[in-house]
Image: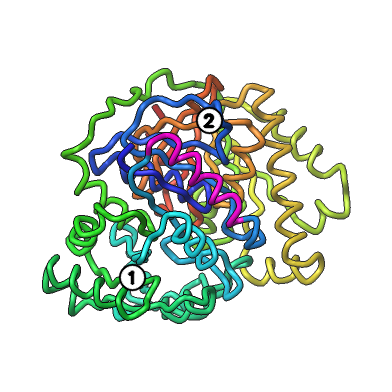
Amino acid sequence: MLLGCIADDFTGATDLAGTIANAGLTAVQVNGVPETGLRIDPADAVVVALKSRTIEAASAVAQSLAALAWLRSQGAQRFYFKVCSTFDSTPAGNIGPVADALCEALGARLNVVTPAYPRNARTVYQGHLFVGESLLSDTGMRTHPLTPMTDSNLVRVLAAQTPRRVGLLPHAVTARGPAAVAAQLESLAADGCRHVIADAIDDAQLELLGAVLAPQWLATGGSGLAAGMAAALRTRATAAGAAATGWPSGPGVILAGSCSAATLAQIERVKDALPRLRLDPVALHRDRGAAAAALDWARARLGERPLLIYASAPPEQVAAAQAALGREQAAQVVEDALRTIAVGLAAAGARRFVVAGGETSGAVVEALGVRALAIGPEIAPGVPWTRAADGKPYALALKSGNFGGPDFFTRAFELAP
């Protein structure tokens, strides 16, 4: 195994696996910390999808180290910690603690970090993360219900999460080529830096970084840096992998928990064309039968047209729900309801699930009991169709809340294998 990857949420894992496959390596995604006896098809890269982005830091570290131990037991030669391309993490967040633990376990002197992903308009310059032409802190991520990003300076953001020194590899160095990058990284390591935020404004810089880092033990970032590493490793690819055949057909459903601006626009585009039901967190909390009633509504309408079931809402409605229930409880009641609905619709014959939001995707995949995914055709940058590779009859498109254009939901079913 050329590359063993640990992703902090399910949509990020699928994004990563699809990106690695597009770069020329075979890739398999495993959901959750694998059991000791889990068998998977040979692959150049294996991505372990965790649901650890917003849980308590000690639990995130424990799960990540367990995933690392399993990947090492499978023969992985180098490792990648996948985080969101918008670096979703509060000052008390998990990126720093997990990265520190992985470095210690691997004996890594230096961990290069960049969430840059130009295909989805994420770039890093002078250590600041941009989304398109805007600083991250000036986008809708500022009001994210779980991980509000109010600072675009990633050196500061990461330094708040780790006692280790955080440095910067600036654009002026990466522009001078691989020798300059390697020399600067060595200088930063000698100066006591454990983590280095790397500037990257285009794919060429990510490929350069990937070539420099491919021989290293560990790197951290979004899918863009991993693509650069995969490109550097593809001449060594050996695993044939399993063809993504045997795609299930049957009724489809869209389950949306993300409250990102992109997902709200996608819902707005299709809500008048599809049978739809909005879930209200406060109502779900007050009425223990509300989730079952939603499932009854959906079962009665399951058929040729996809169903749209969503808890997505604009910031002011999210804030009101959090004020009434608390941030964690508001999120939990939605996840629990979507779990119930997903399992009930699967039993009723639903076979194609489009899921919006990393936390929502993790909840749905866990509820359906899917342990491994084969990667299929790309719907939008970072979002492929996948199929359950463990005998279960499901096709899944797991979408990060911020990904995809306004027509994403329509395209997903048009492109379904």
Q: Amino acid at mark 1?
A: Gly
Residue behind mark 1: 132
Q: Amino acid at mark 2?
A: Arg
Secondary structure found at label 2: strand
What segment carries the magenta color? 60-75
Eyeballing the image, is 147 above or below 397?
Answer: below
Query: Would residue 114 be seen by someone viewing this image from the given angle?
Result: no
Query: Would residue 33 be seen by someone viewing this image from the given angle?
Result: yes
Q: Residue at x 39, y 52 (%)?
A: 80
Name which quarter of the figure residue 303 lies in.
top right
Q: Residue at x 32, y 75 (%)?
A: 133
Can residue 394 be found in the magenta stretch?
Answer: no
The crowd level at tag 1 (other Cα within 10 Å; few <14, some 14-19, many 20+) is few
User: In which quadrant will I find the C terminus?
Assistant: top left
The crowd level at tag 2 (other Cα within 10 Å; few <14, some 14-19, many 20+) is many
Please tell me which residue lies in front, 260 or 57: 57
Residue 297, image x, y percentages = 74, 35
Eyeballing the image, is 405 above or below 169?
Answer: above
Task: Give the CA distance from mark 2 to mark 1.
Answer: 32 Å
Please tell me which residue lies in front, 106 or 401: 106
Residue behind mark 2: 352
